[in-house]
Amino acid sequence: MTLASRYIYAITFAIAATGFLLPFWPLCVVGVLIAALSGRYIFAVVVALLIDLGLGMPTGVLHYLVLPFTVLAVIAALARIFGAAYFLDKTPLDRL
């Protein structure tokens, strides 16, 4: 595990835990998105599952999404995987 990975794990968990402890869900969303978009997919899903278990069932329109943070983590991970193929091209252009 590199030092950068340790910082990303610690920062994303701290942001998500702060959003959980202060009932401010956008911080939880930011923590899950940072983890998923940085390439730590399993960690993002685990943190999202923990937040979903802690917050319980959502009310209102979101009650159809039983685990909204986990769904967000999976969508962000898929966006990272498929978006990397288009936006992070590893082969340089030879000419225009």
Image (tube, rainbow, N blue to C red):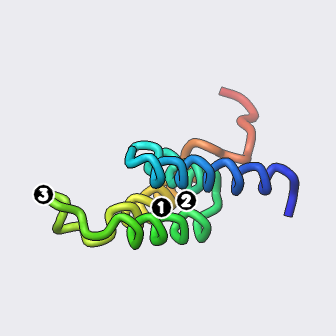
- Local packing at callout 3 (Cα closer than 10 Å; few below 14, some 14-19, many 20+) is few
Q: Which residue is mark 3?
A: 60
Where residue 78 is drawn, which disc sits there? 1
Mark 1 / mark 3, whichever is N-terminal: 3
Q: In this image, 87 relative to 56: left or right?
A: right
Mark 1 to mark 2 CA distance (whole Å): 5 Å
Disc 1 packing (10 Å; few <14; some 14–19; many ≥20)? some
Residue type highlighted by circle 3 = Gly
Q: Is residue 25 visible?
A: no
| Residue 29: image location, x then y, percent | 44, 49
| Disc 2: which residue | 81
Residue placed most toward the observer, 35 or 37: 35
First in sequence: mark 2 vs mark 3: 3
Which marked residue is nearer to the observer: mark 2 or mark 3?
A: 3
Residue 63 visible within the image = yes
Expressed as whole percent of the image width and height from the top left, the position of residue 36 reads: 55, 56
At 58% from the left and 53% from the top, the residue drawn is: 85
Tag 1: residue type? Answer: Leu
Contact (Cβ within 8 Å) of mark 1 with mark 2 = yes
**Which residue: 41% across, 68% down?**
54
